[in-house]
Structures are given as structure tokens and as C-alpha cells.
Image (cartoon, grey):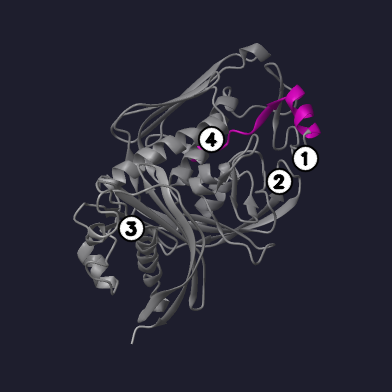
Amino acid sequence: MARSQRTIKTPFEIEGVGLHEGRPVRVSVRPAKPDTGVLFVRSDLPDADPVPAVLDSLAEADRRTLLRVGEAEVHTVEHLLASLVGCRIDNLEVELDAAEMPALDGSAQPWCEALKKAGAVDQKAPRKVFTVERPFFVQDGSASIHAVPARGGTRVSYTLDYRSRGMPAQLVEYDLDATDVPAEIAPARTFVFSDEAEALQREGLGAGARSGENTLVFDGSKLLEGELRFPDEPARHKVLDLLGDLFLLGADVEGSIAAVRSGHRTHHELVRVLKQAMELEENHGRIVRGTAMDIREIAGLLPHRYPFLLVDRVLELEGYRRAVGIKNVTVNEPFFQGHFPGQPIMPGVLILEALAQLAGTLLLRRMEYTGKLPVLWAIDKVKLRRSVIPGDQLRLEVEATKVRDTMGRVSCLAKVNEHVAAEAKMVFTLVDAG
């Protein structure tokens, strides 16, 4: 059963130094509206777009989770995101004045403590839930992750195996619904082996790492400085990283996840696989959500009518930021009568029109635009990548990247069976409906 989305009651601030870049950073955390998710805002880049904590923002990076939109990057977000999983917080705006989140003590415990002090508020929207209905498997060399069906919540296990480095193998298992995550998982700190630390610093990473303060440094099984918080603290920290990476799915997971020797790259690949499966489920209406719209609701919002209403259903609306819809393409579409009737292909301009209509649905939801209509002003970076034919189902995805005054910028993507059919950047101006 879906739970209510949650945000925090009161804002808070945290300061620290980034683990890899070693630069000071101040972070301001504020409540956000339902379906916002987590938005990172770079205050030192005033013209940059916000960076949402979603899979589409994921960028390649070593030993950390890095998100990027345009010129704005946010590094090492996994500990904050893991604390949100543990504290069941879904919607936040996180403003920071540098590129990397603070390492703090190398764990998620300070974040959990700050969230607890800020308090939580239930919101009038359900949290999306993805139920694992079949096995999924991801492997990268000796690292692997299984996700299999299991009713009644989320179960996570992790097998840490550094026996080749002299550290005994560790296995931890959790039922997240029955586990006090802030007490049992969040305090586990980042760790590294002594020879790795030297190599990382040569690569320009780990500049903010401090042995005994925010990083556990091992020589085999020997901890060089400080004391362990748990006998199996390294394995618990791996679970912490996994939970933070799973936040990028944008949904709670009902199922069992078993990881062996995995790291961020393997975690990210699992999220990609689950995201694809979730999108297929959404197309059949089986994802728990509270913002779907049927054709009657769409017609009540948009001024278009048959045969020019080209969005059949809105599957998902994430606040004012993102929308997902579908267009079922049938042989009875009127445009097929004259557009290559012997070998019918949906006109590319109509694919773009369908995306524009969904974007209009997203923009019209903004309360300050009541009585306004979005008018397409410009289209840029259009790419038509594959033909759309009768029997296809177009999955339409739009994301508002900037909305200021009476102007909205939207990134648009149309897919058929996970293959991109079209993409474009659109600019809308909002005019009086009368």
C-alpha cells in the first residue's frame, strides 16, 4: 500500500567540506511541495537550472554519485539521499554554494539527526511504489545485484568480500520496514584501504578525506585510526550507498534486493533496469500514483479536441516539473489516410505536437497561470530518430527546465518500446485565455 509523501516542517542548514574536492560548502534544506522530489539548487550558479535527484540527471563519476543538468553539477549526494530513504522524506529543495555535498562524519547520521530535528509533514499525495514482479539481475565483473519479488516492503542484503585484501567477508541483511535505519545503517562511515587512499589522491579525489574523522582507513582488517561503530561497519556503509542510489528511482521498492561486492556503478545500472520496468508498468496503469489524468480530464484542461487532441492519458505528474503521458497510435488515425497510406508513418510534426500538448498540461497546472494558455513559441534541437507506425504506443516525457514570469522552457522526449522516437527543446509563452 502506498504511503503519503512527506517533507520537512522547518528548514535547516549544514556546513562542511566535500569528501573528494575538499572545498567548504554550506547547504540549506527547505520543504518542497508534493511530487517535487529532491531539487538541488546551486546558489553559486544563479543562472543554472535546478538539478533533480532522478536517474536522468545521473552522470559518470568514480566512487560517488554525481548529478548534472547543463552546467550545474552536484557531487556525492548518496549520503543525503540515503538519509531520506531512512527517514521517509520525499520532497526537498537543497541549495548549496559549491559542487560537492559536505562529507560531515562520512556517514548519513548527521543528515538523519538534522531531518529529525526539522520534523516531518505528511502531504496529500501518495508516494509511488514499484512492486518487483519478476527477477532482475545486474552484473559487472565480480559485482552483482539481484532484485526479486517479496511482499510486504523492502528487504536488502549486502555481501562484502575483500578477503583478497585481508578483510574477512561480511554479510548484512535488513527488512527496511522493521529496521531503525537512522540507528542501524546511517551511522556507518565511508571506508577505504590505505593503498587506495594514496591512489585516489593522485587522481585528485579524496582531498577532503580525514582518517578517523570522516573516513575509515584499513590496512587489511586493521583500522588505522579511530574505532568502529559496528563490527560490520563497511558492509553497512555499502547498504547506505545502495539506499541512496535507489532514491533515484523515484519510488519505494516492494521486493528483495541482494547485492554482492557492488558499488555505485552497479547500483546505478540496477536503477536503470528497474526504471525501464517501472515505465512499462506505468503504461499499463499499474504503478501507484495520485496524479494520473484520463482523456476527459485532459480535455477539461487543454483547448484541443478530436482529431487534434493527441494525448490519450497522463500517467504521471511530478509537481510542476515533469509529466509522462501516452499516445496510442492506431491505423484509424485520420492523418494516415493521406500520409503514406500504403506504408503509414505518423508525421513527425504531430509527434512534436503531442509533446507540446503534454507540456501545456504541465504548465497549466501552475496555480499562478490560472486563466492562461501556453502557446508554443519556439522549438530547438529537434531530432526524429525512428518511424512511428500503427500499433505503436508513444510514451511522452516532458520536463520543465525553466519557468519564469510568462515563459516556460521544456525538454521533451518521445519513446516507443524504450527507443527514442523524437526529442526537442520547446519554449512556451503563456497568454490570457480570453
Whether residue 157 appears in magenta in the rendering, the answer is: no
Q: Nearer the viewer, residue 27 or 143?
A: 143
Pick whichever of labels 4 and 3 is earlier in the sequence: 3
Whether residue 196 appears in magenta in the rendering, the answer is: yes
Q: Which residue is mark 1?
A: 207
| Image position of 18 with respect to 216: above or below | below
Q: At x 50% / y 51%, what residue is drawn?
A: 116
Q: Which residue is mark 4?
A: 240
Number of the label disc, if any, that sits on residue 125: 3
Pick whichever of labels 2 and 1 is earlier in the sequence: 2
Callout 3: SS: strand
Residue 79, image x, y percentages: 57, 42
Callout 2: SS: loop
Residue 3, image x, y percentages: 32, 49
Pick whichever of labels 4 and 2 is earlier in the sequence: 2
Callout 1, which amino acid?
Answer: Ala
Residue 424, image x, y percentages: 48, 59
Q: Which residue is mark 2?
A: 18
